Amino acid sequence: MIASLFNGTISPSACTADTFSLPLLPAIEFLSLEANLVENLTQNVPLGGYPNHGAVNVTGAAFCNISTVYTHLGGNDSVNVQVWLPTDTWNGRLQGIGGSGWSAGLPGPALPGMAAAISEGYATYATDAGLGLSASPLTPETWALPEEGKPNMRLLENLASDSLYEGAAIAKNFTAAFYAQPARYSYFSGCSQGGRQGMMLAQRYPDVFDGIAAAAPGINWNPFVVGGTYPDFLMGLYSAYPPSCEIAALTAAAIEACDGLDGLVDGVISDPDACDFDPVNLVGTAIECPDFKFWDGPRRANNSRMWYGPYPDAPLSGGSPGITPIGTICSANGTCAMDPITLFQEWTRLFILKNSTADTSYLSLAEYENIVDAAAQDYDFIIGTNNPDLSAFRQAGGKLITYHGLADPLIPPRGSEEYYKRVTALDPNVHDFYRLFFAPGLHHCHGGPGPYPDTAFDSLIQWVENGVTPDVLLATSVGTEPVFQRPLCPYPLKQTYAQSLGGVGDFTCE
């Protein structure tokens, strides 16, 4: 636990709307403001519910919940922001919590993290970006296309960037009013969509946060989202719909072939770039492999790369409906059909094709290429989140930590690697303010056989406030016996097995 910066208790009587004034933000009209005292909040926040932290058991927390709604003039939107301010000891810091999937944070994904944050003494906040408090994190269907052919650009811009600055300004204003002093340090934490939000803040609003923890970030938005539909495209192209057990067998074979390349057989591929396993070699065995190209990523007719695929140990089947990279549904007689990855297909259907009834099940390669190109042309400047120029963030004194699971099945980690290389090309000293850590065996944000970096946020605070550079991120195994820790290495360093300690293994960065 990081030491507190502020010792004092705020009277619950201060939790009233009269305590707070509304900030002046251009082209914004505030519609409402409410303040409610919440006492004795008890909640178990599991691993993954508090991005870049470990699990937290919240007990008896008390805070002032300030809820405000505002609209952009002429935008016909209603943006909800909640700011939670602990009434017992405040640690002097503000921590914004990001969203996931198609959610900016509220109503669901950010709330567990906010509960954990106030229990640790942080002022905290999240926004719904105007998407609505009943919006689903799995699909933008309720808000994306109010009229055929005309995507809701106001709400997309809210999600992409505008609500990030506005939410932070509101939270800082309310925090200063409640404690009669501004937060000494401001941080943002998120994974996936939340990671993309963090990267957008560093790129477009470089002086808003002192430190940003942006895990498995959904940057390079258009190629990775459209690329995520590539398995569906291939299944339609070949009219082949393999059952999940076949896909799982391919993943298991890849792990078996490449697991020991780091010197330790532990079910984790530490260096997937060195894995040259070819699933075509399994054709003719008990499973079938009809031209399994997804690991390589989508390619054009001339064989040039459109984007990256996941690494071979990423789980591609057997997940929840609508978010499984290679999803199929099989009947009792063995006939299988596609279960499309709705999480990504909706981007193509609603924003690129602009047609709520479009069928993307059977596309030619030329049609797929056109979708990739249209996505980049229409939306990269809005939500691409891949500007490598972080010079303003560096000049503002900001620090940025990213981790990305090497077994992430949804957002290919090579996208984070490519972005880091582009930043490095502009600033060879990027390591002084931005560090990227790859987590072998870790799935999307959390989960998988690899250890989870539950120290990421505390390492960020030490870097920002005490100048302690994170040479490694300690990661802790989940669900193993015994529990073990391993260092995650700052890119381009990689984990190297040193010696066996009780059969668990000792890794260093080289």
Image (spheres, helix red, strand yellow):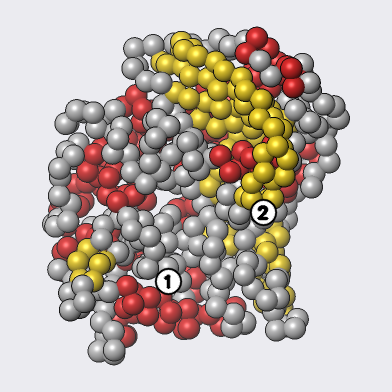
- Cα–Cα gap, marks 1 and 2: 27 Å
| Horizontal arrangement in the rendering, residue 110 relative to residue 326 (left or right) | right
- 92 horizontally vs 225: left or right: right
502 or 83: nearer the eye?
83
Q: Is residue 123 above or below residue 269?
A: above
Check disc 1: other Cα within 10 Å, few if <14, some if 14-19, many if 20+.
many
**Residue at point 36%, 27% (across, down):** 155
Query: Residue at image x 69%, y 50%?
Result: 57
Q: Are marks 1 and 2 in contact (CB under 8 Å)?
A: no
Q: Amino acid at mark 1?
A: Pro
Question: Up-down: is 474 above or below 9?
Answer: below
Where disc 2 sits, the SS reads loop
Front residue (pair 179, 397):
179
Which one is nearer the viewer's eye here, 458 or 307? 458
Image point (61%, 54%), residue name: 46
**From where the camera sits, is residue 78 visible?**
yes
| Residue 161 in view here | no
The residue tagged 2 is: 54
Q: Quadrant of the C terminus?
A: bottom right
Which amino acid, by three-letter code, is at mark 2? Gly
In front: mark 1 or mark 2? 2
Instruction: Check disc 1 and report the residue beneath it.
Output: 312
Disc nearer the start of the sequence (1/2): 2
Element type where label 1 sits in the image = loop
Q: Where's residue 483, x and y in %?
A: 70, 71
Instruction: Report the side of 150 relative to 169 (left or right).
Output: left
Residue visible at 23% across and 28% down in the picture: 146
Q: Which mark is residue 273?
A: none
Give x and y (percent) for residue 378: 27, 34
Residue 132 is situated, as x and y percent measured from the top left of the image, at 40, 30
Q: Nearer the viewer, residue 8 or 200?
A: 8
